[in-house]
Amino acid sequence: MHKKIFSGVQPTGNLHLGNYLGAIKNFVNLQNDPNNNCIYCVVDLHAITVKQNPNELKKNIRETTAAFIASGLDYKKSIIFNQSLVSAHSEGSWIFSCVARMGWLNRMTQFKEKAGKDKEKASVGLYIYPILMAADILLYDATHVPVGEDQKQHLELSRDIANKFNLDFNSPDFLIAPEPLIQKNFARIMSLKDGMKKMSKSDPSELSRINLNDSSDQISNKIKKAKTDIKPLPDNEKELSGRPEAENLLGIYSSLSDQTLDKTIIEFSGKNFSEFKQKLASLVVEKIAPISYEINKLLKDVKFLDKVLNDGSEKANQIAQKKIENMKKIVGF
Ligand code: AMP
Ligand code: TRP
């Protein structure tokens, strides 16, 4: 079957190893299957649901684009664009705001996490963030959406919106309910400083994550300082229970070397962390340093990056504009 793939990443700071292994690496694999049509979006409208510095935002939009290309996305094979250049996303989002129910949004755990204790002070945009995400996906008739595990609930909401719109407006099959594509293994990369917390852009500790634009020295240093426990590495998967840091580091090694966790465990069973960390550091450097080099090179060519986004946005606009026009007709405008 021909798959239509859509995914987005927020331009809100350095992309890290979690973004790469949980999402972007998958984007590249999907792109390289000739049966797929892929669209990848730098979701700047989503970024402003929390306060952004305008100059930083502009820089981060280019940096995310550079990270896409440096990781292997090819603007000749995939559409790469930024959301704010295609007005249908905002328009679709409004129509879907009138389809989605308050009760659905009130269940969204990401809002609860991001808004924290002081919900009254969160932006309304942060609350309706998943509706904009539904517009992103549904405007392109995407059939499959590669995301990290944390986005599964938002994908369910997109499906609910598609189904309710089709039902409410008696337009069966007009909107396509998308399937999430979530990696089965290593779907969640954890912080290097706390195996129970997700590796995240917003963690105040730089040592908690490996950024895609870190230098080889920074990478090695962060792996060296990564939290571990005092036991040697186990000889079977069961013994990893209750050892989140060991599990995470072995998972990173497995994911980067495209091998099963079992195989990695056998490779390092009984070894101590210092020996394993040396191997891990050289593997991460081998895989990430070329991406880092390429990001920094691309960032010097702002014109090129802007052209990729502008050209991509033109192509995206052609698709999205048609869909929103049909949607408006169906709604009765
Ligand atoms: P974000 O940085 O929140 O825009 O996320 C971009 C993509 O990376 C989404 O598909 C996330 O699910 C994924 N992602 C973010 N952090 C992690 C992580 N620690 N492990 C795995 N995937 C992640
Ligand atoms: N919400 C996603 C995240 O934080 C980003 C995103 C926005 C997205 N629109 C999307 C992902 C559409 C997939 C499809 O990671």
Image (tube, helix red, strand yellow):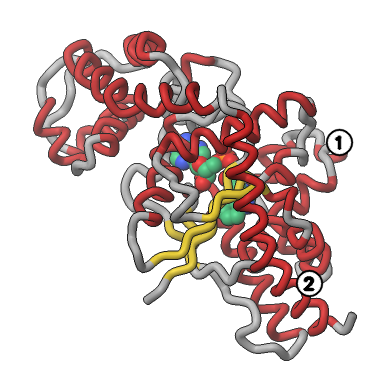
- What residue do we see at 76% from left, 35% from top? 50
Q: Residues within 10 Å of mark 2 (few under 14, many from 20)?
A: some
Q: CA distance from mark 1 to mark 2?
A: 25 Å
Q: Which quadrant of the figure contains the C terminus? A: bottom right
Residue type at numbered disc 2: Val
Residue at the (19%, 43%) spot, across then down: 260
Look at label 1 and name its amino acid: Lys
Give the x, y percent position of residue 110.
64, 45
The residue drawn where x is 57% and y is 73% is: 177
Question: How many residues crowd mark 1 within 10 Å: few (<14), some (14–19), many (20+)?
Answer: few
Q: Would you say 153 lies left or right of 18 here?
A: right
Q: Which residue is mark 2?
A: 99
Q: Residue at position x 45%, y 26% from top?
A: 212
Say which of 43 and 236 sits in front.
43
Above-or-below relation of 282 to 265: above
Of residues 162 and 262, the one drawn nearer to the viewer in this rendering: 162
Q: Which mark is residue 121?
A: 1
